Image (tube, rainbow, N blue to C red):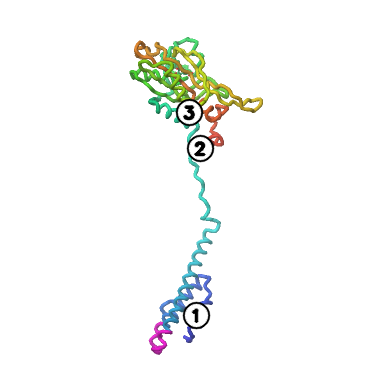
Amino acid sequence: MEEKTIPEYLQEVEEAPLSTKEQLENFRLLWLSKKGILPNLFTKMKDIAADKRKEFGQEINRLKELAEQKFEAAREHIETSAIKTKNAGLDISLDGMPINTGSLHPLTIIRNRMVDIFAGIGFTVAEDVDIVDDWHNFTALNIPTDHPARDMADTFFISQNPDIVLRTHTSPVQIKLMETQQPPIRSVMPGRVYRKDSDATHSPNFHQMEGLYVDEGVSFSDLKQTLFYFVEEMFGEGTEIRFRPSYFPFTEVSAEMDILWKKVNSQTGKEEPAWLEVLGCGMVDPNVLENCGIDSNRYTGFAFGMGIERIAMVKYNIQDIRLFYENDLRFLRQFVGE
Ligand code: DAH
């Protein structure tokens, strides 16, 4: 091999072409491999005059460092550009695809909130099936066959068995509770109910939450105070409500409660204050207590049944009840995180 000076070698290393895999391999063979220039120079050390050896050693070490540095840098460059070519069109630094997680339906959010409020003042939660017999839906609630009050809840009967009905309210759950427990009873009963009604504020399939409190000495003022408390917790202090005398066959006295909300006038498109009926309530009729085997001389009770949709309409200012059932994501997304 032709001898060159160390500065010549340094220059050669510096200028060596190192942009392809082949050039890299040639460089390795020429300089770094066992038979390459560098090991060869090291073996030459012993032939160098003792006084020059140190200097020579330092020089070839510099050459070695430079060759190794160039080799490593070129190798890394070639490898990363190989990865880039392989992944051309794929930018791994981009954000990932968003994952759509579901969220609670506004009616579920409101139902949970309602249950929480009553749970906070000692009400337990009871649920029951949607298909019930005539006794639980009507007769035990003081609505005998052919009673005109049945018209208020004209509903879906099964022609083969008129004794079975899709419940028209959650009140049959009251009956189930009173048939199976003795007072004190203090429960709320959320659930799905069915009726032959359909317009902007009525749906054939909607949700109610029944409430029942039976014990010694329960009075109408307990009922009012409980509902006042609920309204303040749900809608905030100062929310305006009103009680109207009403009639239900299973309560004596009976009332309905309305909340002042903002109704959009369909002609002008402007919001106007208006009363929306949200619940029926009253003192449980002694006949109903007796129908369930509870001594009406000893116990009194109050009950209420509120429309979960109605509460949600007031809470979120939703004008049309049908929005709850259309599964339009533009509507539902507004409640994410509520
Ligand atoms: N069940 C009635 C309805 O669906 C609402 C109701 C009124 C429930 C008075 C009650 C009550 O518990 O005491 O319209």
Amino acid under label 1? Leu
Inter-mark Cα distance, 1 to 2: 67 Å
Quick one: label 2 or label 3, which is nearer the N terminus? 3
Badge 3 crowding class, 10 Å Cα cut-off, few under 14, some 14 to 19, many 20 or more, is some
The answer to whether marks 2 and 3 mark residues whose Cβ atoms lie closer than 8 Å is no
Amino acid under label 3? Met
Q: Secondary structure at mark 1?
A: helix
The answer to whether marks 1 and 2 mark residues whose Cβ atoms lie closer than 8 Å is no
Q: Is residue 154 visible?
A: no
Badge 1 crowding class, 10 Å Cα cut-off, few under 14, some 14 to 19, many 20 or more, is some
Query: Residue 234 has which mark?
Result: 3
Q: Secondary structure at mark 3?
A: helix
Q: Of helix, strand and loop, which mostly describes the magenta segment?
A: helix
Label 2: which residue? 336
Q: Which residues are magenta?
A: 42-55
Quick one: label 3 or label 1, which is nearer the N terminus? 1
Label 1: which residue? 10
